Image (spheres, coloured by chain):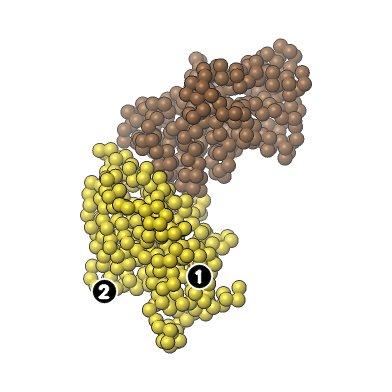
Chain colours: A yellow, B brown
Amino acid sequence: MPGADLKRLAEIARDCRVEIIRILTHAGSGHPGGSLSAIDLLTALYFGGFLRYDPKDPWWPERDRFILSKGHCVPALYVVLARIGYLSEAELPSLRKLGSRLQGHPYPGPPGERVPGIEAATGSLGQGLSIAIGMALAARMERRASRIFGMLGDGECQAGQVWEAAMAAPKVGGTRYCLDNLYVVVDRNGIQNDDFVDRTLSLDPLAAKWESFGWHVIEIADGHEMGAIVKGFRAALEVTGRPVVLIARTVKGKAVSFMENNPKWHGVAPKPREAVQAIREILGVGEAEWPAYLGRTPKVAAIVRELEALETR
Amino acid sequence: MPAKATRVAFGEALLELAATNTRIVVVNADLAKSTMTQKFAETYPDRAFNVGVAEANLIGMGAGLALSGWIPFICTFACFVIGRFETIRLSLAYSHANVKIVGTHAGLGIGEDGYSQMGMEDLTLARALPNLAIIQPADEVETKQAVAYAVDHDGPVYFRLTRQAVEPVSPSGYIFQFGKGAVLRRGSDVTILATGGPLSNCLKAAELLAADGLQAEVINIATLKPLDEELILRSVGKTGHVVTVEDHTIRGGLGGAVAELLSELLPTPLKRLGVEGFGESGDPKGLYARYGLDPDGIAQTVRKSLNR
């Protein structure tokens, strides 16, 4: 992938970060840390040409499916889906609000009112991979080219159902259906709800666990560096004969100094003042040049005004 | 017709339906033989999967298949599958996944294996989920029709089936209707609402009561959810007395559903007959007798509730 394209992906991820902070601040609650650790991976997946979908038809049968098993990080997904046009930009601030389609954790909606891009309900950790396997099997049974991508958290890998599913994926199709159309990304940010993963229940050796269950393992040393992510996804798509897991080292709360690697920011939304600082840091603007930057960047200035107006809530 | 386990009738029906409906898939969790879907797996190997002893994954995979347009029947013991309640709750029910959950080995009727394998609280849990239909057919004829219905029903269904053979109770020409109870015997003194395994005993109990001059109305509640409220209210309005009979805990199953309905709309003296403890090992007939689900026990409970 040419450098220009990698730069474009990084810019999209940066804009998505701003949007994540914005909608979480509107919501007043939610999970910034994991949304920010996952967004570069999601950006590469959706805008790097890996996940195949039709922006005009969310229900295109041949589409690839994405299952966000770490459902609490759905703000990151909503932002991406709005960027595609599946959701309206105007709808995003309704996240977690009464009457909104944008539930606090992924909800695909009732029949007849399905939410585009939300393929299944998740949010109780450990469940998404099983759903992805069912979808991967379905694609194989229909000789559909659809690929299934899932995303798990690392803390989530403590859940038993993950390993029921991990054990099944390479074998359950027997000799007939090989699930090498299944790709799992582990967002390994090292932090879970209570504390650091290693202080809660270490997963080491995580790669060896997946490997021993019959998966092809690809490790991405920096899950925020587009070149490394793209290289990882590329390599994954070339694997045949086995499902693939990509274990990506990430930083929880990435790009916001006071959130980075801090368990406190697993499930707390920023206050408006914190949000403005977060956005400034995401955009890489120093405090001194911030007013001038806002002066020449009306879109960001509007967001800042919008968030500052929430102060009085 | 000879007695037949509803799990056997289910296996036969599914095999037959799969010949014409190519969207039917079976997923097992190491109990294909016990859930009577082994034959399906041998006949349609391309549409049968076994996930091993992993019920949560069974449920999630079923949901994924359904969300891709297949009609998966996920089959294991009632207590094992509903035991993974939280996966059913989120991956399946809340996802509106068109999965047919098949729970065999309902209640005391499984006999010697004892409580660990008995579906005893499954109806209670299944009833709590908003869009999950619950069907517990009473005999072979009803099972076969109910399975055919469930294939076309757009939405998740929970089937509760017996391990033990059950005698036919449906009248000739019986047509299963989803959401409708079936009056198997008319009577004016008491309404017996029953589901699943004990139904034939309820009919025998009605005979015993008739000998004492008591006319019991026996109704088969095959669809527990949605409940046939209209039929129940009509019958109870006429008789003024209700006994519910189920091979299941008395907390929250058929007895619970009827108690909720009547306490809100038609307060009526009600006796819930079912299992109050854990259940235990024993021969199925002996267990039914010990827990009062045999004809004598049911008749006695009815007499007591009527002070007769």
- Furthest residue in direction top, as rendered: B211
Q: Amino acid at mark 1?
A: Pro
- Find the distance from the CA under tag 1 to the CA under tag 2: 33 Å
Say which residue label 1 marks. A270
As drawn, the label of residue B281 is: none
Q: In the rendering, at what x and y percent does residue A34 appear?
A: 42, 62
Front residue of this view, candidates B239 and A293: A293
Q: Position of residue A292 (x, y in %)?
A: 43, 88
Residue at image location 39% in from the left, 81% down from the top:
A285
Residue at the (55%, 38%) spot, across then down: B126
Q: Secondary structure at mark 2?
A: helix
Q: Residue at x 47, y 58 (%)?
A: A194
Q: Quadrant of the C terminus of chain B?
A: top right
Of residues B230 and A127, the one drawn nearer to the viewer in this rendering: A127
Contact between marks 1 and 2 (CB within 8 A): the answer is no
Residue at image mark 2: A4
Estimate the x, y position of residue B258 in percent, counting from the top left.
Answer: 66, 34
Q: Residue at x 57, y 44 (%)?
A: B130
Note whether A51 is above or below A181 in the view shown: below
Is residue B234 visible in the rendered image? The answer is yes
In the image, B269 versus B6, the foreground residue is: B269
Q: Earlier in the sequence, mark 1 or mark 2?
A: 2
